[in-house]
Amino acid sequence: MSEQGELQWYVIRCFGNHERRVKEDLLEMFREEGLLGNKVEQIVIASETVIEMRNGKKHTTEKNMMPGYIFFQGIFDTQINDMVRNINSVIGFLRPNNNADPRPLPESEVNRILGRVAHDREVVASGGLVEIPFKKGDAVKIVDGPFKGYDGTIEEVYPERLKLIVHVSIFGRRTPVEVDVNQVEPE
């Protein structure tokens, strides 16, 4: 167990797709017991914000980077362990084996994970990177713009500009044309 007063990062295992509910339940329980700010500093779900294009519109979604895992910053002791294990959908703290106490995460690992989460939030706040559902080599049909009705193959994808280079056959020749992501559909 960690020394009294030493905040460390630990991993709590839970059922997949239950992370948000478990986090809310843990925070509520720690608040009721007066442990938030004393023995418990914060609980974090490592997620990334992704902007997807659907039907020509941007949709923002949260995708969990590590399903089934929640990061806990606090002081590990038997009281915290018992409280965490009594929450529905929680398996327990991540341990090297069943009888051992959980090991705190190394600071470098925490910084890597949380740094990625913070970076993703900054990218989205500044306009975001969009997850484009197409990749090089995909067959597509152009459904809008001057090349409407042409079939082609994607040669290049530019996610930052939301553009694609599609090779289409015009007068029997392969011709590269630049189109917006929302101007094509999978064939």
Image (tube, rainbow, N blue to C red):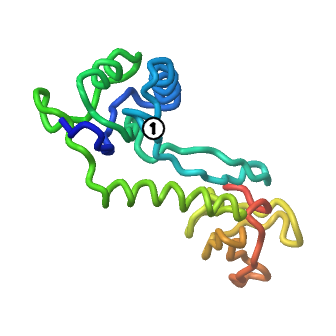
Badge 1 local density, few (<14 within 10 Å), some, or many (20+)?
A: some
The residue where tag 1 is placed is: 43
- Place residue 99 in its image quadrant: top left
Q: Quadrant of the C terminus?
A: bottom right
Looking at this view, name the residue that lies furthest to the right: 146
Left or right for 138, reference 93: right
Left or right for 53, reference 105: right
- Place residue 66 in its image quadrant: top left
Q: How many marks?
A: 1
Q: Nearer the viewer, residue 50 or 56?
A: 50
Q: Nearer the viewer, residue 17 or 158?
A: 17
Q: Residue at x 49, y 27 (%)?
A: 27
Check disc 1 and give the amino acid type.
Answer: Ile
Element marked by disc 1? strand
Q: Residue at x 68, y 48 (%)?
A: 60
Query: Is residue 92 visible to us here?
Result: yes
Q: Is residue 80 above or below residue 124?
A: above
Query: Is residue 139 visible to us here?
Result: no
Q: Is residue 88 above or below residue 93?
A: above
Residue 129 horizontal/vertical position (percent):
64, 63
